[in-house]
Amino acid sequence: MPELPEVETVRRGLVPSMEGACFARVKVNRPDLRWPFPENMAERLTGARVITLRRRSKYILVDLDRGETLLIHLGMSGRMTVSGDPLGQFVHDHPAQAKHDHVVFDMDNGARITFNDPRRFGAMDLLDTASAEAHPLLAGLGPEPLGNAFDETYLLERLGNRRSPVKSALLDQRVVAGLGNIYVCEALFRAGISPTRKAGQIAAARIAALVPVIREVLSDAIDAGGSSLRDFRQADGELGYFQHSFDVYGREGAPCHRAGCRGHVRRIIQSGRSSFYCPQCQR
Ligand code: ZN
């Protein structure tokens, strides 16, 4: 499942083909994904020019010159592929239409963007740009973990009186937007905090230390995505899924990566999700 860094990688990969370009032709091959597509989506997009591509949490927001914003959510298995880009970013020929190619954007610069989603948990919607933040998917989201509003004072205030485990508290999208299971596990490992510890019982200095660690974990993954973008330009034009090296996530039973620690990574289930951590060095 794509998390924030993967979505950011997709956004960055789409920018050269979409920003400044117009939708020349839009093909919608089915009525819905997770939810129905907005009414007349193809007609409303055709001819519109893309002003900018933004990201909020795990959503890509494509601002159009008509006062509307196209929201794209990759869901569990959504993939974006770019082909035919005349700017030389993605020089691949357009592939034959594949099963699960649900939406195809042909831009007026020759680029084609294909949205493929076998499990159909993805979504697209069209919203008024001016009131985009009030959209049900976006309203109530906490601050961006890489933004200025997410700082030590804020996190202390939000976690200070919580009785829930810190793992669940950080997964709460009202506390911080876009953090998912993988990067919460990785951040707690780097911070040396056990995922089972109650948020409100962690010393203030340790909570404060989580802020730069969360930013660092996400930035490292976005950097890894950046290098994968360069590879994709030479591969098949598919954006966003790249090889990660994790310290704890998916490493159950493997030796801890922390220098001098003899622990092994343990997996437990918290609120129905796997938590990976080192019981030796995460307290
Ligand atoms: Zn350890």
Image: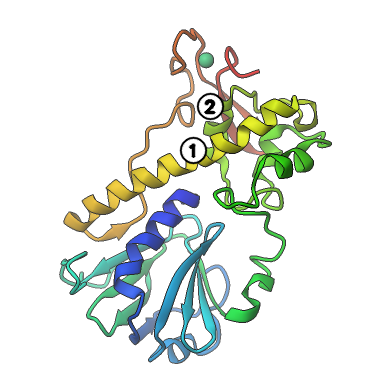
Residue at image location 44% in from the left, 78% down from the top: 30
Q: Horizontal and vertical percent for residue 228?
A: 28, 48
Residue at image location 82% in from the left, 33% down from the top: 163
Mark 1 element type: helix
Question: Residue tagged by mark 2?
Answer: 190
Camera-side residue of 282 and 119: 282
Q: Quadrant of residue 232?
A: bottom left
Earlier-in-chain disc, 2 versus 1: 2
Question: Residue tagged by mark 1?
Answer: 216
Q: Is residue 102 above or below residue 156?
A: below
Q: Is residue 271 left or right of residue 233?
A: right
Q: Horizontal and vertical percent for residue 200?
A: 80, 31
* Image quarter (top left, top right, bottom left or bottom right) of the C terminus: top right
Callout 1: few (<14), some (14-19), or many (20+) C-alpha neighbours within 10 Å? Answer: some
Nearer to us: label 2 or label 1: 1
Q: Is residue 160 left or right of residue 14?
A: right
Name the amino acid type tagged 1: Glu
Camera-side residue of 118 and 154: 154
Q: Is residue 181 left or right of residue 196?
A: left
Mark 2 element type: helix
Callout 2: few (<14), some (14-19), or many (20+) C-alpha neighbours within 10 Å? Answer: many
Residue at image location 45% in from the left, 56% down from the top: 7
Q: Quadrant of residue 244?
A: top left
Q: Is residue 128 above or below residue 154?
A: below
Name the amino acid type tagged 2: Arg
Query: Is there a contact, CB below 8 Å, between mark 2 and mark 1?
Result: yes
Camera-side residue of 239 and 225: 225
What colour scheme has been applied to the protein in the rendered image?
rainbow
Mark pair 2, 1: CA separation = 10 Å
Q: Horizontal and vertical percent for residue 16?
A: 30, 69
